[in-house]
Image (cartoon, coloured by chain):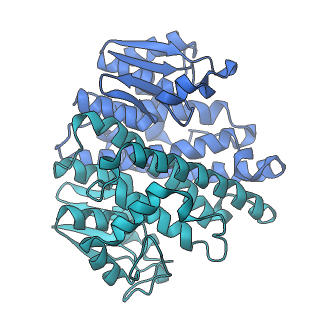
Amino acid sequence: MYRLHAAPDFASTITHLALVQLGVPFDLVNVDFEAGRLHTPAYRAINPLGLIPAMETPDGPIFETAAILMYLDERHPGVLAPAPGSAARAAYLSWFVFMNNTVHPLTMLLVHPERVAGEDVQAEVSHGVSAQLAEGLGHLDRALAVDPGLGHPAIGFYLAVLLRWMQKFAAVPADAIDPGPLPAIRALVAAVEAMPAAKRVAEAEGLGPTPFTAP
Amino acid sequence: MYVLHYAPDNASLIVRLYCEEAGIAYRCELVDRSTRAQDGPGYRRLNPAGLVPALETPDGPIAETGAILLWLTDRHGLWPDAALQGPFLQWLFYLSNAAHADLRRLFYPEYYAPPGSLPAHHDMAAARMVVHFTLLDAAATQYPALFAPQSALAPYVACLLRWSALYPRGQTGWFALDRWPALTQLAQVMDARTGTARVALAEGLGDRPFSAPTHPLPPEGSAT
């Protein structure tokens, strides 16, 4: 049995989607981060970074969104991603890691531009981050247009949640990402939104009827 | 045979060291950064983002250091014991999306911060790197097998230590390897590997590329 330490509309939403899609039993533990729970020794023992999500497994706790997705994919192969050993794994991993080390951090900077160089310059920083993000999403959009089969659930779930935040939570609203020029990304995210797993998670986390296409 | 598209002392070094240690056959093809070959159409077909490295495989090209390491780990049966797979994955992704990403921001501040705020940007990124290395030092102490030379984590950590000591030139005062005993040991162990010696010779990295790094003098190509 897995125990996902989560909060609504956090990165845990991505792993929550994966668990529901896999249909494996799990407990969802809402972490009361406003009460400082992330900084307690008990939580730090599960995730030394003090971030959400973390997941307890029969093999011990794991943190990092992408690590949790990969761990679940290794344990329950063939649902979230192309099976290990299959030819599609090469392209899948390239874009999955790109999502995790480029799109995800840039999205967080769009939401928190003050983390780059302080609050004085956050408007300029936000503008640059938004441009970098649009460029990175453009690469992904072209890859998806050439090969729609790249839109495996692990990539679709990850992208859908990040795209929600890029549209809704940019610190400088003018720098929010407009998915208009990204047709392949829009198509993938619309397909994710229509999945039963997405409907169930959106309801459980209170994300509204169109959490990804019109958050 | 795999083709590793590389530039000396670039992130391709991590993949190259991993292949050497595991005995994975590969050949290198230079990406000439002095002519910005990484932005040319040929390279962009391998990696649309134009970053080094890319690995050509029978299943097509793979971009992103972390993706290449994971793919090779799978394909060559190099996973750690089942109980260590979770920690392996979490530290690999942490290296990729936090430590490596923050180090890139330290090296290329102009992509992130306006000119007047570069010192503030540097200090904030350097402070995060200190946190990353401190957590990695604790992890290497807790999981020695995961940070042994055969693991993909070891060359990744060793290279981040090397680059932190060298780049950006003149702004490395925040970094002191001896603050982190487990990482110091990792750097020394990696320095002593025969695979490291071969790669150091090929890329001009000197005798102790990880525990006492010097700027590269590559026989071909350019690090920047």
User: Can you tell which quarter of the image residue B157 is in?
Assistant: bottom left
Q: Position of residue A14 (x, y in %)?
A: 46, 27
Q: Position of residue A80 (x, y in %)?
A: 30, 30
- Depth check, front residue: A151 or A67: A67
B54 left or right, relative to A137? left
Q: Is residue B220 above or below residue A133?
A: below
Q: Residue at x 47, y 15 (%)?
A: A201
Q: Residue at x 48, y 50 (%)?
A: B137
Q: Is residue A123 above or below residue B10?
A: above
Q: Residue at x 32, y 33 (%)?
A: A71
A82 left or right, relative to B176? left
Q: Position of residue B101 (x, y in %)?
A: 53, 54
Q: Is residue A77 above or below residue B160?
A: above
User: Can you tell which quarter of the image residue A7 is in?
Assistant: top right
Q: Is residue A141 visible?
A: no
- Depth check, front residue: B110 or B141: B141
- Depth check, front residue: A164 or B13: B13
- Depth check, front residue: B110 or B66: B66
The blue-tinted chain is A
A32 left or right, relative to A190? right
Q: Residue at x 22, y 30 (%)?
A: A77
Q: Is residue B4 above or below residue B206?
A: above
**How many marks are shown on the rendered structure?**
0
Quarter of the image that includes the N terminus of chain B: bottom left
Q: Is residue A178 visible?
A: yes
Q: Position of residue B120 (x, y in %)?
A: 76, 58
What shade has chain B been given? Answer: cyan
